Image (cartoon, rainbow, N blue to C red):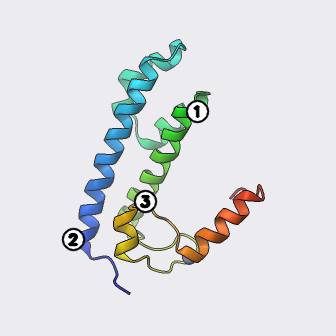
C-alpha cells in the first residue's frame, strides 16, 4: 500500500485551503441574499472567522444550503487539523493508513473503507457519533 508523502500532504493541504475559501465565498453569497437580517450581517465577518466560529454561526441558520456548506467546512477543517496534528491520512476510527489514491480522490476522507461502511450503517440506524 502506497502511503502519503510529505510533499503530497502539502499539495493536499493547499487544495483543502483553496476549497475552503471557495466555500466561504459561496457562504457569503448565500448569506447576502438571505431574508434574515442577522445572516446578512455575517457576510463581512466570514473572512475573519475561524472554521469553528463559522460553523457555530451557520448552525443557527435554518437554511438547507448553508447546512450543506457547514458540513463541507467541517470536513475540510477536520482534515486541516489532522495535517497540523500529524494524523492526516489515518483512519479516524482504527488509525489504518489511507492510500494516496483515496486521498487524491477525496482529500477530506476520514475513514478507511471498513470503518466508513460501519459508520454509515450506524448513521442509518440513527446512532449519532
Ligand atoms: Zn478504519
Task: Label 1, secondary structure: give it.
Answer: helix
- Residue in view at x 32 percent, y 76 percent: 4
Q: Is residue 27 above or below residue 126?
A: above
Residue 104 position in % (x across, y down): 34, 66
Q: Which residue is mark 1?
A: 64
Indicate which disc, 2 or 3, sits on the residue closer to the N terminus: 2
Quarter of the figure with the C terminus: bottom right
Q: Which residue is mark 3?
A: 108
Indicate which disc, 1 or 2, sits on the residue closer to the N terminus: 2
- Residue in view at x 62 percent, y 27 percent: 62
Q: Is residue 42 above or below residue 70?
A: above
Mark 3 neighbour class, 10 Å CA radius: few under 14, some 14 to 19, many 20 or more: many
Q: Is residue 105 above or below residue 22?
A: below
Q: Can residue 32 be seen?
A: yes
The Cα–Cα distance between marks 1 and 2, rounded to whole angstroms, is 37 Å
Looking at the picture, tell me which residue is in the foreground, 113 or 61: 113
Amino acid at each position: 500500500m502506497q502511503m502519503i508523502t510529505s510533499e503530497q500532504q502539502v499539495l493536499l493541504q493547499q487544495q483543502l485551503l483553496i476549497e475552503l475559501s471557495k466555500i466561504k465565498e459561496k457562504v457569503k453569497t448565500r448569506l447576502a441574499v438571505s431574508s434574515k437580517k442577522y445572516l446578512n450581517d455575517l457576510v463581512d465577518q466570514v473572512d475573519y472567522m475561524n472554521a469553528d466560529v463559522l460553523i457555530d454561526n451557520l448552525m443557527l441558520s435554518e437554511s438547507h444550503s448553508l447546512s450543506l456548506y457547514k458540513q463541507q467546512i467541517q470536513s475540510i477543517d477536520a482534515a486541516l487539523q489532522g495535517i497540523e496534528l500529524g494524523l492526516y491520512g489515518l483512519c479516524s476510527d482504527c488509525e489504518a493508513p489511507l492510500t494516496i489514491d483515496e486521498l487524491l480522490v477525496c482529500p477530506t476522507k476520514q475513514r478507511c473503507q471498513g470503518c466508513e461502511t460501519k459508520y454509515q450503517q450506524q448513521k442509518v440506524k440513527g446512532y449519532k457519533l
